[in-house]
Structure formats: C-alpha cells, structure tokens
Amino acid sequence: MILFYLFLLNNIQAISAFILPTQHIMTSSKNCNKQPLSPTRRTSSIAFDNGNNNGIGDKKEKYNRVDLWKQRNQKLTTTTTSLELSSTSSNTIQDESSKAIYTFGLLTDIQYAPVPDGFSYSGNPRYYQHAKVAAEHAAKHFEEEQVSCVVNLGDIVDGKCSDVDGCHLGHESVDDVLNALSSYTTGKILHTYGNHELYNLSRKDLADKLSIPFVDETGSGELVGYYQHLLHNQKKDCNNKGLRFIVIDSYDICLLGRCETTSAKRQQAHDILSNNNPNYDSNTPGTENSPEGLEGVSRRFVGFNGAIDTRQLEWLDQSLQSAKEKGEQVIICSHQPIHPDSTWPTCLIWNYEEVLDIIRKYSDTVIASFSGHAHKGGYTRDEMSGVHFRTFEAVLESPENIRTYAMVDLFKDKLVVRGEGDCVSDVYDLDHLNIESNVQI
C-alpha cells in the first residue's frame, strides 16, 4: 500500500510544457537503474483528472496512470507472434523484431540546456545536461539496430538556452544535440519542432538546422513546417505498399515566432486566445500562458500551444487520401497531442477537433498518431476510428543512468513499442485497418 501511494504522489503532474523561468538547482541522481516495462494489448484510454487548477504551479493537474502501473509486471499474451519484453532476453527480442516489416526509433522532448539540473513549476525534476547524453545513447542504439528512420517529436532544446549567464546559446545547443544524434546514419531523422525551439530559433533557422522543409504558403513569409516521408517495404513476402509518416506543424497558428505587427497567423492566434482565455492580455507578458479558471479541454487555450490552419488541414486530408489509394499505412507525427484522452488538456492542439475529424475519415489507413509535449506520456484508442493516439515520455525528466526513448516495430497485425528507460512499452492491435479488403499489409 505504501508503494502504491508513493506511485500516486510521483505521478501527480502539472503543466510540463510551461516555460517561464524556473529555479535552477543542483541535484544528484540515485538508484536509477530500471527494467523495461512489460507491454499489454491496449484498447482503453488512460484516465485524466481535468479538475479546476487555479494558477500556474499552485494546484497540479492530476494524471492517473494507475492502469499502466498495474500493467508493469504483466506479460503480453496474444498470438504466436507476441513479445514478452520483460522476461525474454535481448537476443530473443531482436530476433522477434527482425520479423517486423518496419522498425524505427523514436524520442521526444530532449530539451537539452547547458545549465544545472532543476525543476518544473510543478516540482518535477529536469535533467537538462543528461538529456543530451541520453539522446546520444539512443542514437547509437538506433544505429546498432539499423532502424529504417528515427522520429524526433520536438523540443530538442529547452527555452533556458535563450539566456545562459546573459548569453543566447540556442543555436549552439541545437548543434550540440544534433552532434549527439549524429551516430545514427542508417536512415533519416524526421524532426518536428515545438514551443521550446521557437523560444530559441526562428523557423528559417530550424529549416536549416533540422532539415524541416518549411513552406511559404501565400508568399507572405509565414513559414509552416509540414511534410511526409515514405518507407518502402523491403520484404518480398509481404504485400505492404509502404509506411508513410505524415509530420504536421501544430505551431502553424500561434503567437510564438510570428511578427507582432505583420503576421496574419499571429493575429489569428491572438483572436483565438482573446475569445477563449479571459486571462490573456496582449499588453501583459505571461498572461497568455495562464489557464486559471478554464475547465476541461478549454485549458488548451494557452500561449505555448497552437493550431493548424486551413491549408495544412487540406494538405493532411489530401495526403491521407493519396496514401489510402496507394495502399500505404500512415503514422501521424506532431509535437502537440491531438486526442484529448491521450494528454493533459493544457497540451492539446487548439483546433484538435478539426484534425480528429480528418483522421477519422481514414480509419482504414492511419495506424496511429504519435506526439510529445506532455512529458509523462499518455494513450488512448479512439472509439470512433480505432486509431491509436500515443503521447511519449520525455527524455528530459529521466535522471542519470535512465535513457528514455523507444524502438517501434510494425508487424502485419500489430504495432509494438519497445520502451527504454521511462518509456512505456506497449502493443497496439491493427484490427481497425480492414486488412482483408484493402491492398494494405
């Protein structure tokens, strides 16, 4: 019973994406060796308490992960192709994963900064420098397993890089993390970007450093970074036509990095916040980040979030239609979570309903939607479509000797997340894809 209450205490989390300056303190890491988590077949959502949180950091947003806690020591029992990650040897796991059609690496919210360890507003420890060490370890592991590509779900550096002893070290810090990831050379690293990148760099700089193909949709200079990447099937004994990653830009419409006087997208963001968050005062910095008095999903209307504009929504619809016609399967990647049951409401995309409506149209094509931003992770399976929505655990909040990232294997009948460190391992059915009547797998 004591362990149970300790678990609950450790998992009461607040707004992990918030970035006003927090106190730096030196911390020491202790007894940090953890074993991989045992996966179970998932069909139901993680529960969230969207209680009334008044103010930033005084009352905490509660996150109930008791279901995952109960599953830690359970073995996966499914078909003959099931994996028992907690009890099998690493060789067995690699032998099983070699049967996958595709394997890729994944990590999120590295948030490296050349500063001492500290805490978030809610009191969660943050290991800014160890995060880069963990990223380097992950890259070497990805290269060792020869994964087809790597997905970085955003926030590669922390906002603190913008002011380190009076210096702006954002550019240097991004370069440091990219150098840490450079051990992986087998395939491409698919970068998304989040609010923390925008605290440090312009979108043009992000395009140069992260190879994100930003586009100027209207010729007005308003850059938006969405794109797609196709993995071709190399297995001759499988009819899969390809795995397509669709990377969306959830900071299309936002305050961050947009010109205050000329940006139409910033004006849209201003209007959205003005209409939905009574705390927001454009003349008072910081008020845009307060969800005080907002309830439920309305708490998403804060300044460290954003929305997806009409042109990108149309592109998403067209891209999914094209993938469906070609018999491809799709994983959607974004920094901000899309489904309200997969995250805290303070981390949701502002117009998540519009994005969900499009995804639900292609339930026989979209396997899953992967995101970061909410550091403790989350999961739900959408009841209307069967699509899996997974928010991944942050690299940043795992202490020394724990390196948090994932290997993801796609089989004919399931998607397997092999979590490392604090990343929860899991297995997701693909029974929503209507495999029998499509050219897909």
Image: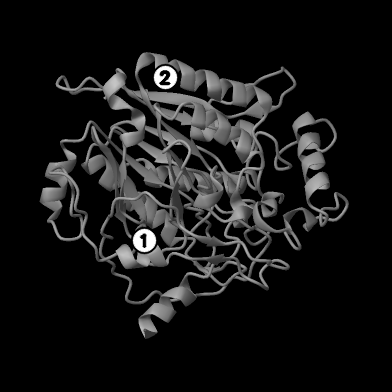
Could you tell me the amino acid type at mark 1? Asp
Q: Residue at image x 46%, y 63%? A: 397
**Of all residues shown, which one is farthest toward the bottom?**
2
Residue drawn where x is 86% and y is 53% of the image: 281
Q: Is residue 44 left or right of residue 71?
A: right
Task: Work out which quarter of the rendered image holds the N terminus and state it.
Answer: bottom left
Sort mark 2 into few (<14), some (14-19) or many (20+) by Cα contacts within 10 Å.
many
- Amino acid type at circle 2 is Ala
* Marks 2,1: beta carbons within 8 A: no
- Secondary structure, mark 1, is loop
Identify the residue position indicated by label 2 in the image.
Answer: 323
Up the image or down, 230 lies above or below 163; here it is above
Colour treatment of the image: one colour
**Residue 190, horizontal then vertical, whole percent:** 43, 34
Q: Position of residue 425 (x, y in %)?
A: 31, 54
* Image position, residue 224 (x, y; %): 63, 28
Mark in the foreground, 2 or 1: 2
Task: Give the residue pinned by disc 1.
Answer: 422
Query: Which one is in front, 387 or 144?
Result: 387
Q: Image quarter for residue 71?
A: bottom left
Q: Quadrant of residue 105?
A: top left
64 sits left or right of 288 in the view: left
Q: Is 421 drawn above or below residue 322 in the view shown?
A: below
Residue drawn at x 34%, y 63% is 402
Spatial CA distance of label 2 from label 1 is 33 Å
Q: Is residue 329 above or below residue 288?
A: above
The answer to whether 103 appears left or right of 264 in the picture is left
**Image quadrant in which the C terminus is located:** top left
Front residue (pair 412, 260): 412
| Residue 66 shows in the view | yes
Task: From the top left corner, tell me how far across and down residue 337 is, in percent.
Answer: 54, 45
How many other residues sit within 10 Å of disc 1, few (<14), some (14-19) or many (≥20)? many
